[in-house]
């Protein structure tokens, strides 16, 4: 096997490890708050559902009432508090050299490169939660069937606009 | 409003007058299409029968027919199209109107298709491939006169090659384009027969078998080809039964023979129906393919839109050097196929000229192929394990059918272990060649310039092994089967990615 000694920190859970090793810039840490709100919006209804289930059913069959409710809320709170910042630290991007590079994920890591000249069109989007934290996301469309859209979330709104301009200039010069 | 082939062929100058309708024979086609559709009506008829209202059945069927015909006629009446100087305008819809404008510039490909009935009526279905995602977004004219369809295609093609800009609109648009057409590949009936023999398929067998079971009591003769006893009965008629009973294996051979016969016959039949009079011609800007026995299709693949070439063969036919060539283009081929089959069955030396037309070369025999890591068998092995465990659990519950699980599991496991050895790739400078599969070897030739984006993927299994998977974003093709090089050393993957992305855009 290839036993090349690692030049970067080997702790795979070190947030800086992957991005630093691959020369990527991190996304805005405030994106963790956006993810947190999104996660909360997903999980809290589930936890409420579990509580209702507990109240309606488990109590009637004289099961261990309260166990499911407690567990559901515990898991939801832990996930909401810890996971978003961890997920955000796995996102990385690099713009320059005529190409946009976006990396995401750790368990299944995908590192995508889109040359500017291959970009069909660009979206800069902002959801209500993102607006609250002054963030935007950049969506790059290519003509490939695989990767027809590449999304980079967690950018400060002005940076996203600047990146859009950079990419747009390249598209224009390509056609000139 | 008159509707003649000549009017359809003529270029349009006055927008108000030149709206055209579909060919009136389309209505006849609608009647033919009514056949399968009336199946929907069967439950209603059955309900009438069961409730004893027999007298109402005939009026109900008549009302259904009348309603369908009026609907078809209304559709025909409310569908009109206009061929402008540089665009096609289509208006359709009975209640909600739809107005669609397709500029000639955006039409990648004009296909002409004729079914059996359409051929008898001299009409053809025209499809415009715009490269827009989704089948429902592709516009079409179903159907207009064949010569009008061909004239329309010539007009659009001439426009795309920039001629329309030069000539006045009053010129005849169906003047032939500049360079002459050249026949690249054709299939003679002999070749078709050979191809059909290699096309041996037992898929039809399932259908025949199911039919035999289903119609067993309805058939005038009592004979099931899968039942050896029936073969023994046949032998009895010839006074051979005593001999046969002492040589039971003959009955087995009889069954096997009929299996083979069905397999070969269905292979040959599908080949003949699909590829009869197959012709691939090189036209100034496109490769044009016409084929089909009952349903004739006429498809043009713009040469500059070809993104990748795929050479498919089989483990058996490979030994005789037979291959099939498909081209991946922005537009898709028909309903099911995502690639354009441009050579159905040929030796490599006949395929090479076609590849040369799209500026793609085959790797030489001495190309340095590199292997993917064997770890790619893992997915299949996990599946095999799942099947085995599931089956054994079923067995432990006393379900004898559960033994099926381990057997299938072992088969899947062996196949994925064995198949993992056939994942190879090589970089040819201008293009990447990816080879995979043992049962159906597939060689993908992907020019660097077609690649729109590259994913470098690794996960918790590949990363400790220092491996990564490269996935290429290429226009066209299926979104399910993207081009990828699985499990190669991560340094190699990075280097290859950089090399591919520096390639110039394919025009």
Image (cartoon, coloured by chain):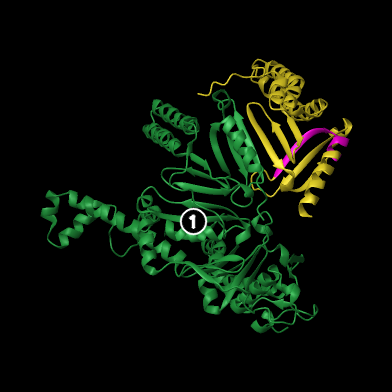
Chain colours: A yellow, B green
Say which quadrant the C terminus of chain A sits in.
bottom right
- Which residue is nearer to you in this view: B267 or A20? A20
Residue beneath disc 1: B325
Q: Which residues are magenta?
A: A149-161
Q: Is residue B386 left or right of residue B94?
A: left
The image quarter containing residue B101 is bottom right
Q: Is residue B98 left or right of residue B375?
A: right
Check residue A157 for magenta coloring. Answer: yes
- Residue B450: x, y in percent? 63, 50
- Which residue is nearer to you in this view: A94 or B70? A94
Image position of B238 with respect to A17: above or below = below
Q: Chain of mark 1?
A: B
Image position of B224 with respect to B366: above or below = below
The image quarter containing residue B33 is bottom right
Find numbered disc 1 in the image and state the secondary structure of the residue it sits on: strand
- Which residue is nearer to you in this view: B126 or B202? B126
Check residue B286 for magenta coloring. Answer: no
Specify few, some or many for label 1: CA neighbours under 10 Å numbering under 14, 14-19, or 20 or more.
Answer: many
**Residue beneath the point at 12% across and 61% down:** B239
């Amino acid at each position: 096997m290839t036993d090349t000694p690692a030049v970067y920190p080997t702790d795979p859970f070190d947030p800086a490890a992957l991005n630093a090793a691959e020369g990527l810039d991190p996304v805005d840490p405030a994106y963790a708050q956006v993810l947190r709100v999104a996660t909360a919006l997903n999980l809290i209804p589930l936890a409420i559902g579990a509580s209702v289930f507990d109240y309606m059913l488990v109590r009637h069959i004289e099961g261990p009432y309260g166990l499911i409710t407690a567990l559901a809320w515990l898991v939801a709170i832990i996930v909401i508090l810890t996971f978003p910042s961890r997920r955000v630290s796995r996102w990385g991007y690099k713009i320059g050299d005529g190409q946009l590079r976006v990396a995401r994920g750790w368990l299944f890591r995908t590192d995508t490169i889109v040359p500017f000249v291959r970009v069909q069109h660009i979206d800069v989007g902002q959801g209500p939660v993102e607006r609250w934290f002054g963030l935007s996301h950049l969506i790059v469309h290519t003509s490939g069937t695989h990767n027809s859209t590449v999304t980079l979330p967690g950018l400060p709104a002005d940076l996203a606009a600047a990146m859009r301009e950079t990419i747009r200039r390249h598209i224009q010069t390509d056609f000139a | 409003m008159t509707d003649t082939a000549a009017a359809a062929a003529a270029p349009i100058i006055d927008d108000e007058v030149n709206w055209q309708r579909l060919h009136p024979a389309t209505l006849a086609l609608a009647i033919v299409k009514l056949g399968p559709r009336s199946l929907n009506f069967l439950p209603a008829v059955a309900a009438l029968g069961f409730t004893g209202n027999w007298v109402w059945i005939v009026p109900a069927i008549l009302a259904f027919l009348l309603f369908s015909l009026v609907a078809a006629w209304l559709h025909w009446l409310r569908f009109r199209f206009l061929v402008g100087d540089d665009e096609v305008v289509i208006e359709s819809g009975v209640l909600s109107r739809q107005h669609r404008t397709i500029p000639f510039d955006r039409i990648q490909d004009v296909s002409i298709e004729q079914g059996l009935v359409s051929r008898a009526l001299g009409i053809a279905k025209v499809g415009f491939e715009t490269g827009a995602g989704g089948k429902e977004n592709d516009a079409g004219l179903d159907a207009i006169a064949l010569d009008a369809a061909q004239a329309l295609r010539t007009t659009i093609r001439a426009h795309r090659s920039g001629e329309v800009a030069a000539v006045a609109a009053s010129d005849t648009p169906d003047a032939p384009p500049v360079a002459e057409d050249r026949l690249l590949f054709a299939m003679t009936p002999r070749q078709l027969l050979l191809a059909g023999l290699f096309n041996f398929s037992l898929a039809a067998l399932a259908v025949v078998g199911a039919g035999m079971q289903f119609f067993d009591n309805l058939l005038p003769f009592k004979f099931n080809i899968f039942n050896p006893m029936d073969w023994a009965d046949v032998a009895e008629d010839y006074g051979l039964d005593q001999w046969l009973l002492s040589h039971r294996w003959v009955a087995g051979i009889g069954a096997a023979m009929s299996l083979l016969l069905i397999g070969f016959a269905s292979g040959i039949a599908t080949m003949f129906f699909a590829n009869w009079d197959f012709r691939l011609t090189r036209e100034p800007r496109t490769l044009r393919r016409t084929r089909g026995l009952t349903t004739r299709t006429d498809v043009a693949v713009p040469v500059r839109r070809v993104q990748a070439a795929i050479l498919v063969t089989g483990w058996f036919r490979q030994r005789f050097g037979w291959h099939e060539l498909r081209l991946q283009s922005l537009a898709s081929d028909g309903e099911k196929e995502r690639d354009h089959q441009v050579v159905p069955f040929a030796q490599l030396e006949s395929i090479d000229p076609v590849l040369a037309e799209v500026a793609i070369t085959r790797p030489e025999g001495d190309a340095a192929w590199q292997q993917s890591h064997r770890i790619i068998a893992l997915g299949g092995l996990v599946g095999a394990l799942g099947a085995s465990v599931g089956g054994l659990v079923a067995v432990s519950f006393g379900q004898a059918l559960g033994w099926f699980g381990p057997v299938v599991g072992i088969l899947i496991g062996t196949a994925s272990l064995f198949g993992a050895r056939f994942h190879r790739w090589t970089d040819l400078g201008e293009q990447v060649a990816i080879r995979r599969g043992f049962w159906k070897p597939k060689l993908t030739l992907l020019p660097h310039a077609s690649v729109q984006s590259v994913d470098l993927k690794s996960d918790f299994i590949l990363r400790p092994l220092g491996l990564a998977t490269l996935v290429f974003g290429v226009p066209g093709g299926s979104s399910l089967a993207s081009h990828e090089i699985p499990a190669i050393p991560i340094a190699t993957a990075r280097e290859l990615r950089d090399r591919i992305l520096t390639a110039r855009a394919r025009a």
